[in-house]
Amino acid sequence: CLVLGLGVTAFVVLQAVQGKFRPAHVWLLVFALGLLWASLKALWSGPEPEPDGIRITEAEAPELFKALERIRRKVQGPPIHAVYLQDELNAAIRQRPRFGMLGGATNHLMIGLPLLMALDKVRVMAVLAHEYGHLRENHNRLSAWIYRSRRAWIKLYEHTKEDTGAMGMATRSFLNWYFPRFAAKSFAMARQDEYEADRIAAQLLGPDVAAATLTELKIKA
């Protein structure tokens, strides 16, 4: 849609420059600009709110940040930009898009205080290694792109739900066909990525520790 809008706009501008502009071109231009506006709104997912919890700094938890840096070097992943302490028995990494679907992201790590209290140090490290495994270099670009793509398609679908025109109906028909397939494929990739993150945790801390950590978390949860 974005390419089509740009192409039609370029065509109308070229006609005007060559002195061949006609009244019908006005409607083409209106169509192209509307298509561009709708496409850019869908592609721009907008800023996301910061994660819930208390943001902690390296001065407050130096050993944690040293451990994260050791894991980062071994995984050869990007830096963690912020760490948050939460009230859940869980840990997770979230990538916040900087420029919507256009690229760029910051990496935020959320660690639950109950998780820190429930596991010993080496098993906490196994959890962090697993989460950091999601940020390994070959995963980072692809997962961020999939995440932004899912948001963009959902936003476009919501935008077209209220559009009763022919363009909106055509777009919804395409989305009804395409998005379930995209969601199914990306879900399968996400599950495979969990296995890869488990493998990285096992590599860094040993398969026995990684397996015991998963079992203990499940039981204590």
Image (cartoon, grey):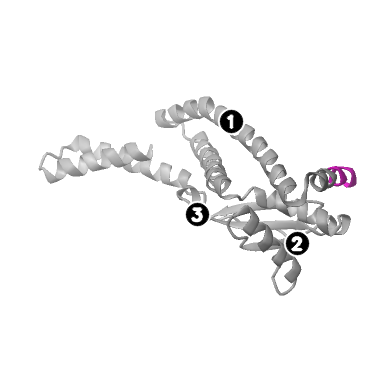
Query: Nearest the camera: 192 or 28?
Result: 192
Above or below, 144 relative to 50 = above
Query: Nearest the camera: 155 or 131?
Result: 131
Amino acid residing under circle 2: Leu
Amino acid residing under circle 3: Gly
- Residues at marks 3 and 2, CA–CA distance in whole angstroms: 24 Å
Amino acid residing under circle 1: Lys
Crowding at mark 1 (Cα within 10 Å: few <14, some 14-19, many 20+): few
Q: Which residue is mark 3?
A: 104
Position of residue 32 measured from the top left corner of the image (x, y, whole percent)? 31, 40
Position of residue 57 measured from the top left corner of the image (x, y, whole percent)? 69, 70
Q: Do the CB atoms of the residues marked 3 and 2 lie less than 8 Å apart?
A: no
Query: Nearest the camera: 78 or 70?
Result: 70
Q: Which residue is mark 1?
A: 185
Q: Which residue is mark 2?
A: 85
Please count the marks in the image: 3
Q: Which residues are magenta?
A: 215-221
Residue at (50%, 50%) from the top-left corner? 100
- Magenta residue check for 153: no
- Mark 2 residue element: strand
Crowding at mark 3 (Cα within 10 Å: few <14, some 14-19, many 20+): some
